[in-house]
């Protein structure tokens, strides 16, 4: 291990969607999970609220790691393990995946020679190791090289970049085992009506007004309301137990999303907490789960949704803009999820050698 530390190791820093993380080949990291996690904590600069001695950006959305390896089965091209690293606490969690960092996995696989690029657009089948599901990422590769430049804008990211189409199938219940993990469409926790859902990400959906807020507050305003964040923590820990996740006190799932009527021509307005820190936007699979819940008649918050035009995606308003999510449900009772689609962007920020603190 000391040899690895002194020599450094290969790392690519990428923005994926509205997150930023360090991407590694699995073969470049220790095979022992404890040694791997210790190394990653030192790379990221955790524990330290500023992460001043590492790559982390002092926020959960910039303290993330993607570990990519060649696939061992014919149904996918690569395997992607996501790890959420704490900021002020030395925690490493693989209990959930990350749809934002997923937006850069295909390009990383091409850059590292794991997948050959096509002449125009390349499609990479990715197994999300955390959940066991398959996602398909499609992105431009003109002349057989990854192109990050483009004209697609996503809320929460300045400028534009090349579009990345992410298609998800079989994400229903991928973490908790079923779309409605508690067996209920709606229930009460701490006196608050909620819908607990898992379509790729365990989420507790509740109305913002039931917490005494409008749902239009900024992330900074929400973060300063310690009474609110204490209630969020109580809600999510009780919901986590009901969802079969056990003691979630020290983990980042389930997420909590508070919803309100839209006010910027979207379909629904959201404020999300990870786990109690307000998210500057909303996660990809978190957004997929929220939209899925709101499309179920009778779910908490479904009455607030302004339905989009036929064939159009659901636009989720969040603190820094909107996220468009398409969820295709069948006609069964209860409905089953056929597929979900999200458009993201990604960009390579740095490729080289990272030196962990000793």
Image (cartoon, helix red, strand yellow):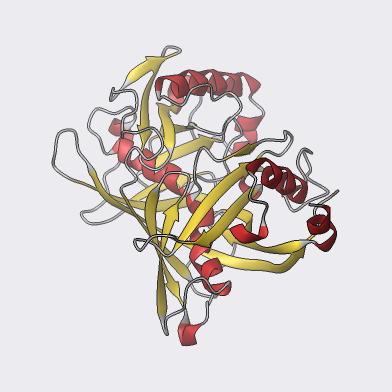
Side of 84 where 116 appears, left or right:
left
**Residue 200 falls in which quadrant of the image?**
top left
Residue 334: x %, y % from top left: 18, 33
Residue 33: x %, y % from top left: 63, 43
At 69% from the left and 69% from the top, the residue drawn is 351
Q: Does residue 330 appear in this view?
A: yes
Is 191 or 201 nearer to us in this picture? 201
Side of 45 where 289 appears, left or right:
left
Please identify the residue farthest to the bottom as the structure is shown: 143
At 51% from the left and 33% from the top, the residue drawn is 253
The answer to whether 344 is drawn above or below residue 275 in the figure is below
Q: Does residue 25 appear in this view?
A: no
Is 226 or 304 nearer to us in this picture? 226
The answer to whether 28 is drawn above or below residue 261 in the figure is below
Please identify the residue farthest to the top as the structure is shown: 191
Residue 143: x %, y % from top left: 48, 87
Is 198 or 299 nearer to us in this picture? 198
At 54% from the left and 18% from the top, the residue drawn is 234
């Amino acid at each position: 291990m000391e040899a690895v530390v002194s020599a450094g190791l290969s790392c690519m820093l990428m923005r994926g969607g509205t997150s930023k993380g360090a991407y590694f080949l699995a073969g470049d990291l220790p095979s022992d999970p404890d040694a791997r996690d210790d190394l990653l904590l030192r790379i990221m600069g955790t524990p330290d609220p500023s992460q001043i001695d590492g790559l982390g950006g002092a926020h959960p959305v910039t303290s993330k790691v993607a570990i990519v390896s060649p696939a061992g089965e014919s149904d996918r091209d690569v395997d992607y393990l996501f790890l959420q690293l704490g900021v002020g606490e030395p925690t490493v969690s693989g209990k959930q995946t990350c749809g934002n960092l997923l937006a850069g996995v295909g390009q990383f696989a091409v850059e590292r020679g794991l997948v050959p690029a096509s002449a125009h657009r390349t499609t990479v089948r990715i197994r999300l190791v955390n959940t066991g599901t398959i996602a398909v990422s499609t992105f431009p590769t003109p002349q057989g090289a990854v192109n990050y430049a483009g004209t697609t804008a996503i809320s929460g990211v300045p400028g534009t970049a090349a579009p990345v189409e992410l298609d998800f199938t079989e994400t229903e219940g991928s973490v908790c085992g079923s779309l409605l993990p508690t067996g209920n469409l709606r229930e009460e926790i701490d006196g608050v009506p909620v819908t607990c859902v898992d379509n790729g990400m365990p989420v507790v959906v509740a109305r913002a007004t039931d917490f005494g807020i409008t749902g239009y507050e900024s992330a900074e305003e929400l973060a300063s309301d310690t009474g609110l964040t204490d209630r969020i923590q109580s809600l999510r820990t009780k919901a986590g137990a009901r969802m079969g996740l056990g003691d979630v006190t020290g983990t980042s799932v389930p997420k909590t999303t508070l919803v309100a009527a839209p006010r910027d021509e979207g379909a629904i307005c959201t404020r999300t907490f990870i786990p109690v820190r307000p998210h500057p936007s909303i996660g990809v699979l978190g957004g997929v789960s929220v939209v899925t819940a709101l499309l179920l008649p009778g779910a908490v918050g479904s009455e607030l949704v302004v339905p989009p035009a036929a064939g159009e995606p659901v636009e989720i308003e969040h603190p820094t803009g909107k996220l468009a999510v398409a969820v295709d449900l069948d006609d069964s009772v209860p409905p089953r999820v056929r597929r979900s689609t999200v458009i993201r962007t990604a960009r390579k920020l740095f490729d080289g050698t990272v030196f962990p603190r000793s």
